[in-house]
Image (cartoon, grey):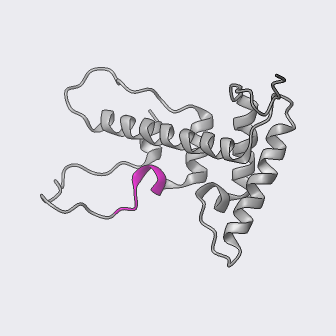
């Protein structure tokens, strides 16, 4: 049985993330998945195909569009969890050293592409108990600029 590089798993390298980030900085609607044109779905698929061609051109192996989409989804999930942990840690009481990890430069750039609503939400107030006027919502810039 011959195993091709398409079937073999490989670790995503820093160069892959850099290529993805640069591509998404050029195509912000692609990063957020928000296309406003009639052909939005087709454009989205074409952009993924183009990105996968660039990623494959690095020579570190091949993955299908679906595998790269899964990789991107997993990365966004991890990034959202990390920003939530940082926010939770900052808003916590009790003092002591920070428990959560800081975001690296690549993660900060991805957050800039994805926008504040990715990490902060859409700003709809919660129902239930009234909010405390002393506590204020911090932006992602405040979270990462320690």
Q: Is residue 109 at all visible to an observer of this figure?
A: no
Q: Residue furthest bottom?
A: 38
The residue that appears at 67% across and 47% down in the rendered structure is: 66
In the rendered view, tell whether residue 34 sits above or below residue 63.
below
The residue that appears at 44% across and 35% down in the rendered structure is: 82
State which quarter of the image contains the C terminus.
top left
The residue that appears at 58% across and 50% down in the rendered structure is: 112
The residue that appears at 40% across and 52% down in the rendered structure is: 120
State which quarter of the image contains the N terminus.
top right
- Image spot of residue 110 (x, y percent): 60, 45
Residue in the foreground of this view, choosing between 89 and 136 = 89
**In the image: residue 10, left or right of residue 95:** right
Does the magenta run of residues contain 72?
no
**In the image: residue 100, left or right of residue 108:** left
**In the image: residue 56, left or right of residue 25:** right
Q: Which residues, given as a range, are shown in magenta?
A: 117-123
**In the image: residue 27, left or right of residue 121:** right
- Image spot of residue 48 (x, y percent): 74, 53
Residue in the foreground of this view, choosing between 139 and 111 = 111
- Image spot of residue 117 (x, y percent): 46, 57
Q: Residue furthest left?
A: 129
Residue in the foreground of this view, choosing between 130 and 146 = 130
Give the tally of numbered discs: 0
Q: Is residue 6 at all visible to an observer of this figure?
A: yes
- Image spot of residue 80 (x, y percent): 46, 43
């Amino acid at each position: 049985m011959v195993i091709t590089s398409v079937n073999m798993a490989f670790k995503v390298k820093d160069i892959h993330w850099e290529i993805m980030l640069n591509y998404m900085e050029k195509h912000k609607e692609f990063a957020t998945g928000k296309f406003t044109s009639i052909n939005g779905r087709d454009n989205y698929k074409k952009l993924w195909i183009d990105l996968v061609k660039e990623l494959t051109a690095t020579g570190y192996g091949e993955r299908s569009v679906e595998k790269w989409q899964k990789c991107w989804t997993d990365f966004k999930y991890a990034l959202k969890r990390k920003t939530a942990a940082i926010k939770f840690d900052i808003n916590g009481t009790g003092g002591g050293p920070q428990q959560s990890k800081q975001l690296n430069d690549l993660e900060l750039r991805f957050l800039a592409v994805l926008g504040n609503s990715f990490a902060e939400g859409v700003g709809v107030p919660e129902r239930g108990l009234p909010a405390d006027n002393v506590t204020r919502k911090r932006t992602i810039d405040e979270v990462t600029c320690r």
